[in-house]
Image (cartoon, helix red, strand yellow):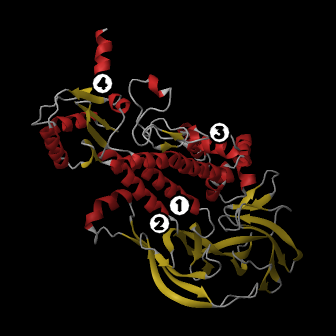
Amino acid sequence: MKDVKCECGHVNPHGTVLCEACGKVLDENEKKNPLLDMRYEGSARRSQTYNKTIIDKIWNFFSSVKVGVWLIIITLIASSLGTILPQEMYIDQPPEVYYEEEYGWFGKLYYQLGFNDLYGSWWYLLLIAMIGISLVICSLDRVVPLYKALKAQRVTRHEGFLKRQRVFGVNTHVDNDDFTVIKKHLKEKRYQVREENGNILAEKGRFSRWGPYVNHVGLIIFLFGGMLRFVPGMYVNENLWVREGETALVPETGEKLYLRNNQFILQHYDKNKDKTFKKAIEEAGEVVKNYQSNVILYNRVGENIPGEKPKLEKIKDYKVRVNHPLTYEGYSIFQASFRSDLEAMTFALTNKKTNQSFGEMKINLRNPKSVYELGNGYSVKVLSYFPDFEFGKNGEPSTKSRVPNNPAFVFRMISPENPKGETSFVAIRQTIEPSGNNTYKMAFKGIETKNVSGFIVRKDSSLWAIILGGIIFMIGVIQGAYWNHRRIWVQNKNGEVWIAAHTNKNWYGLKREIESVLTDTKLNMPEDQLQTEKQDKEVV
């Protein structure tokens, strides 16, 4: 496709509507319109010029504002659908089982479509990437030709260009002193004034035209920051439970950081000492004053053989409290919650009739023994252990998890008079004797608990991009909202003074400025042709 040479001598790219230099109309279709479309200065946009190759078609698809808007709408709908059911990160069961069991066919479909891990699914990331591509291509398709057209514009413009501006007027009186006064007033209004052959072009606020494209740059950086969160190691938000006296691996640290929980402290307000909270304490009962875990952060030293206990080097002691996290190398460990886990249960082998005890046994719920010897021929075997007991669908006992939330046991009680033993199923507040009426029973004596601190391990290496994108976006909003691009042409045409003006918004403000500029001259105020056309239609 050949370039188009205007009568003024400027060579324009194919598809240019208005000559970039003088403003002459080059497109026959544009000649039919009473006023010029100045949105992109009549520049040649690639999306409206080329449509032959596959690259052209891809470019044209993503350069469409409608396509960009639809991509955003589809992404918003998908994001809202992702809130209907819990995301995979909030469930403690295999997702392929959980969604179908809890929500039936809808849950199964929800899982198959990838809504269970929406923000990590490939198609959601593809939508975000397509929005970013659309923003880049939309911006390049418009900002590059617009910049070239504004840079190439001359002071002296074609008659057809001036006549078809929204604000235009002709004065038959020509006085050189008027031009001097106009230039003075324009400079006072902070216009940049250029002269050519006695003609004037006054311009200010051109930078405001780049506001929408600065917005796009900010959004692209923001989306880039959001996509960085899916890169392994860039964003971490994991739960970590550590029992008192135990050491656990900090997740997503490459098996380098370990955390030991020395002590969990729970403090309440005292209504006698903390009189400010006396009324709240009386109404609510106990009010927590402080959640705190005294911890030690370790770093692994050297490489470990699988199964070998890691060699740890102390980094620091810290008291983790709510809103006072432990921070190290970009990781933050927050105190989020706590719970008291069952640690041990004590039972006594007892004769049901006489209540005579033949020995006690303490069962470690984390690692119970298979046999407990009580002496004198008495012993207890643990045939089955269910840490989190429930009856399954088939009526058989099972466990929901390995955490001892609701422990249950199947014991075999062996005594001198019954060496084969008696079987008893024992759960909290429940005892079942499968073989009938037993002579002995397992009498509950007590429990031991241990505090478990709940932490949130967080790392966000993408935050800088999100903040930077947000700042740049707001700069673009301010740039485009509070300033506007204004141009005023004052030209001497065949013994007449032609005045034309254009702005991208706030026409009322532009006309007020023109009135001020023409003060102390004999030139008349140009008329608003669009407003005059509307008034004529109303009269008709």
Whether the residues at callouts 1 and 3 have beta carbons within 8 Å, the answer is no
- In primary-sequence order, the first of circles 4 and 2 is 2
Q: Position of residue 310 (x, y in %)?
A: 67, 88
Cα–Cα span, label 1 and label 4 = 47 Å
**Residue 414 versus residue 175 in the image, above or below:** below
Q: Nearer the viewer, residue 445 or 204?
A: 204
Q: Which residue is mark 1?
A: 225
Q: Residues within 10 Å of mark 4 (few under 14, many from 20)?
A: some
Outermost left residue: 520
Closer to the camera: disc 3 or disc 2? Answer: 3
- In primary-sequence order, the first of circles 1 and 3 is 3
As shown in the figure, which amino acid type bears the numbered disc 2? Trp
The picture quadrant where one finds residue 358 is bottom right
Task: Please give the name of the residue rendered at 73% of the width and 71% of the height, measured from the top-left corner.
Answer: 442
The picture quadrant where one finds residue 367 is bottom right
Image mark for residue 529: 4
As shown in the figure, which amino acid type bears the numbered disc 3? Asn
Q: Position of residue 291 (x, y in %)?
A: 44, 71
Image mark for residue 464: 2
Whether the residues at callouts 2 and 1 have beta carbons within 8 Å, the answer is yes
Q: Nearer the viewer, residue 513 or 86?
A: 513
Label 4 SS: helix
Whether the residues at callouts 3 and 2 have beta carbons within 8 Å, the answer is no
Q: Position of residue 449 (x, y in %)?
A: 58, 74
